[in-house]
Image: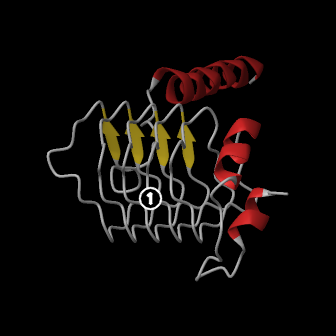
Amino acid sequence: MGLVRRIFSILLVLFVFFVFVMVPTPAMAASSAAIRAFDDVEAATKDFSGQVLPQAEFSNARLSGANFSGADLRGAVFNGVNLTKANFRGANLTDSIAYLSDLAEADLQDAILTSAMLLKSNFRGATVTGADFSDALLDRTQILQLCQSARGVNPVTGVDTRESLGCR
């Protein structure tokens, strides 16, 4: 009886090992419907206005002059993207990331950028009238630069732009 038990135990261990270690399991990843990536592109059409693009990823894209007005870009990532003169008027960029991106002369009027991480990006000449930067993370030099022209109140959140940037 002891020998049968021992053989059964060894077979059980081998079976468990084979099933859980040797048999590959399917990869668990977000579906393509959950994340839309736009890498290294120069979009032929730069009109993303009014589109719902939560968690979209733009990396090393050339989107100068692109139109994102009224777009839902919550959680979107812009990494090393050229967005000079882009239109983000009224866009929702809550929880988004713009790292090493160029937003020079971009129109951020009435945009919502709450809890956004906007480090190492260029906002020189950007229009921020009515934009809400509450709890956004920006470099100190960016804040000082944006405060020079910041004014207005966001029509959706009711937050004063200068107050959301911490302007003095």
Query: Which residue of the protein is positioned furthest toward the front in this rendering?
Result: 148
Which of the colour schemes (rainbow, by chain, secondary structure, one colour) is used?
secondary structure
Find residue 9 and report its horizontal and vertical position in percent.
68, 24
Find residue 153 and report its horizontal and vertical position in percent.
65, 77
Numbered disc 1: secondary structure? loop
Find residue 28 and report its horizontal and vertical position in percent.
47, 41
Q: In this view, does 51 lie above or below 7?
A: below
Q: Is residue 61 above or below residue 92?
A: above
Residue 27 shows in this picture = yes
User: Image quadrant of residue 10?
Assistant: top right
Locate the C terminus and report the quarter of the image it occupies. bottom right
Tally of numbered tags: 1
Residue 28 shows in this picture = no
Query: What is the three-letter code of the residue carrying label 1?
Result: Asp
User: Image quadrant of residue 140?
Assistant: top right
Badge 1 is on which residue?
107
In the image, what residue occupies the spot 53% across and 31% down? 100
In the image, what residue occupies the spot 64% across and 37% down? 119
Locate the N terminus and report the quarter of the image it occupies. top right
- Relative to the observer, which residue lies in front, 38 or 126? 126
User: Image quadrant of residue 107?
Assistant: bottom left
The 10 Å Cα crowd at callout 1, few under 14, some 14 to 19, many 20 or more, is: many
- Relative to the observer, which residue lies in front, 102 or 147? 147
Query: Which residue of the protein is positioned furthest toward the right in this rendering?
Result: 168
Q: In this view, does 124 lie above or below 164?
A: above
In the image, what residue occupies the spot 60% across and 66% down? 131
| Drawn side of residue 159 relative to residue 77, left or right | right
Find residue 128 and report its horizontal and vertical position in percent.
56, 61
In the image, what residue occupies the spot 71% across and 76% down? 159
- Relative to the observer, which residue lies in front, 123 or 134? 123
